[in-house]
Image (cartoon, rainbow, N blue to C red):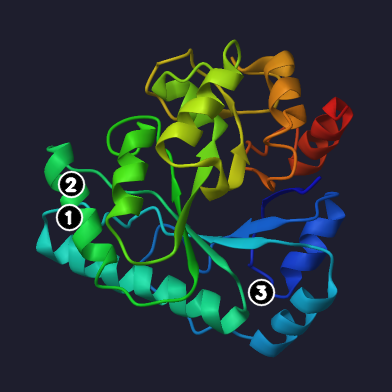
Amino acid sequence: MRIGAHVSISKGFPSVFDEIKSIGGNCAQIFSHSPRSWRFKDPQNVEEFRERYKKEDIKPIVIHNSYLVNLASMDEELHKKSMENTIKEFETAKSLGIDYVNIHPGSNRDPKIGLRRIIDSLNRIETDVYLLLENTASKIGSKFEDLEYIIENIEIETGITLDTCHAYAAGYDIVNDLDGVIGRIDESIGLKKLKLIHLNDSKFDLGSKRDRHEHIGIGKIGVDGFRKIINHPELRKIPKILETPVDQRRGFKENIEFVKRLIE
């Protein structure tokens, strides 16, 4: 099973492999730059990263787009920066040999206008790096049909990331009706498009619309909920990335160890 976490590149891109091995993971997610800044630095040690990526059994590595990006925005300056940032993410992924860039769809007061804005934006980008659209806890992307609509109307090869906290907060009962939720993904998007799982517990109740991650098994999804998710035959082979808190209770290593104990 592929289990990893979102790790820092503060010591350089090649350090990702050592970071993941130190916490017992075998896949990873990174920010290519500060997620709260528009500023990019040119990637360093690119060849070293590419060589290690070929050799190391740590796959996939996914780039997560900046928190500032909003491709659904009608604010021209924000949208311009969002486009530039997203294009740069794809370029960075290409240079590093990374196959996936994960993005949040974006937000707009009018979801229909927002969806069209996202589609128009993505259709202006040319890349052969695979795009992952992440489901959200509220607004655009909180319904699987939103992601389906985007995928059906863009040219970039695209799949989805299922965030367990976001799905639960959006009202998908992955605790008591996991088969039903998986069925809805298959009917709308298709399970072959599900490429990544963000494995996060939820601080808040089903349908809360609140995006607050919790340690695995401690939140509202709980131990039994994650045991079902991890061992479900349709989900076992899909890479799972932790975005859980790092605090005095647990770090990524402890959460990964906890997840491994649930594997049947």
Q: In the drawing, does residue 118 fall left or right of residue 264?
A: left
Residue marked by disc 3: 13
Seen as rendered, the residue at the extreme front is: 187
Seen as rendered, the residue at the extreme bottom is: 47
> Where does residue 56 sit, x and y in percent of width and height?
84, 70
Whole-number angstrom distance, CA of label 3 to CA of label 1: 32 Å
Q: Identify the residue at horizontal 74%, vertical 62% (top origin).
A: 59
Q: Quadrant of the N terminus?
A: top right
Q: Say which amino acid is labelled 3.
A: Phe
Q: Say which amino acid is labelled 1.
A: Arg
Sequence-first tag of 2 and 3: 3
Residue marked by disc 1: 117
- Give the number of the disc on residue 190: none
Which secondary structure lies at badge 2? Answer: helix
Asked if one can make out residue 40 in the rendered structure from this viewpoint, the answer is no
Q: In the drawing, does residue 157 fall left or right of residue 115?
A: right
Closer to the eye: label 3 or 1: 1
Residue marked by disc 2: 114
Which secondary structure lies at badge 3? Answer: loop
Closer to the camera, 39 or 56?
A: 56
Q: Identify the residue at horizontal 59%, vertical 20% (top origin).
A: 178
Q: Quadrant of the C terminus?
A: top right
